[in-house]
Amino acid sequence: MKKNDLSSKSIDELWVLHEEIAYLLSQKINTEKSKLEKIADELALRGARRRRPYPQVCPRFRNPEPPHQTWSGRGIQPVWIRKLLADGKTLEDLRVSEEDALPRTKSPMMAP
C-alpha cells in the first residue's frame, strides 16, 4: 500500500486498519512469546539440579570479644580468626566446648 493510498483514506478507515494491525501484531507477539517460554522451560529443565540438603553445622570456634561471632571451621577463615591468630592465639584457644556447640533448642518460655 502506498503512502498516497493512506492519505486518501478517511479517519474511520485508517482507524480500522490500525486496529487490524494491532490485532495481528498482538497475535504474533503472543505466538513468539509462547515459543520462547517453551524453549526457556526446556533449558531450565536441562540445567536444573537439585542441591542436596546439608545438615546444620554447629560452630566450632567463638570469638572471645564479641562472643556472638562464631565459625564452623568450614570455608574461608573469618577476619576475626585471622586477626586473633596473628596476635598469637591458637585455634584451640578459640574452640567451643562440646556442650556449647550443640544446637540450641527453644526454651519453654519462648514457645508460642
Image (cartoon, grey):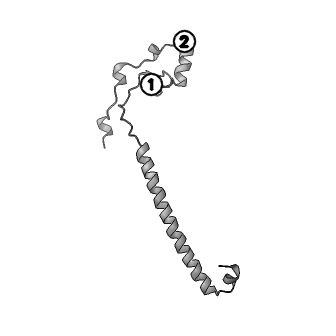
Q: Nearer the viewer, residue 50 or 13?
A: 13
**At 52% from the left edge and 69% from the top edge, which residue is drawn?**
26
Q: Residue 100, position in %: x, y?
A: 36, 23
Q: Please identify the residue farthest to the left as the structure is shown.
A: 108
Comes first in the chain, label 2 or label 1: 1
CA gap, disc 2 to disc 1? 21 Å
Q: Secondary structure at mark 1?
A: loop
Q: Residue at x 64, y 87 (%)?
A: 10
Up-down: is 9 above or below 70? below
Q: Quadrant of residue 38?
A: bottom left
Where does the image place residue 76, in percent across and percent down from the top left? 51, 25
Residue 50 in which image quadrant: top left
> Residue 67: x, y in percent?
46, 25
Q: Quadrant of the C terminus?
A: top left
- Residue situated in front as seen by the camera: 35 or 60: 35
Disc 1 packing (10 Å; few <14; some 14–19; many ≥20) = few
Q: Quadrant of the N terminus?
A: bottom right
SS of the residue under disc 2 = loop
Location of residue 4 in the rendering, given as x and y in whole percent from the top left corner:
70, 82
Mark carried by residue 74: 1
**Mark 2 in CB contact with mark 1 (< 8 angstroms):** no
Q: Residue at x 39, y 37 (%)?
A: 51
Relative to 13, is 72 on the left or the right? left
Above or below 31: residue 75: above
- Measured along the vertical axis of the image, is residue 53 above or below residue 6? above
The residue depicted at 46 percent of the width and 60 percent of the height is: 34
From the image, tell me which residue sits under label 2: 88
Residue type (three-letter) at the residue carrying disc 2? Gly
Q: In the rendered structure, which amino acid carries the disc numbered 1?
A: Arg
Q: Is residue 108 above or below residue 6?
A: above
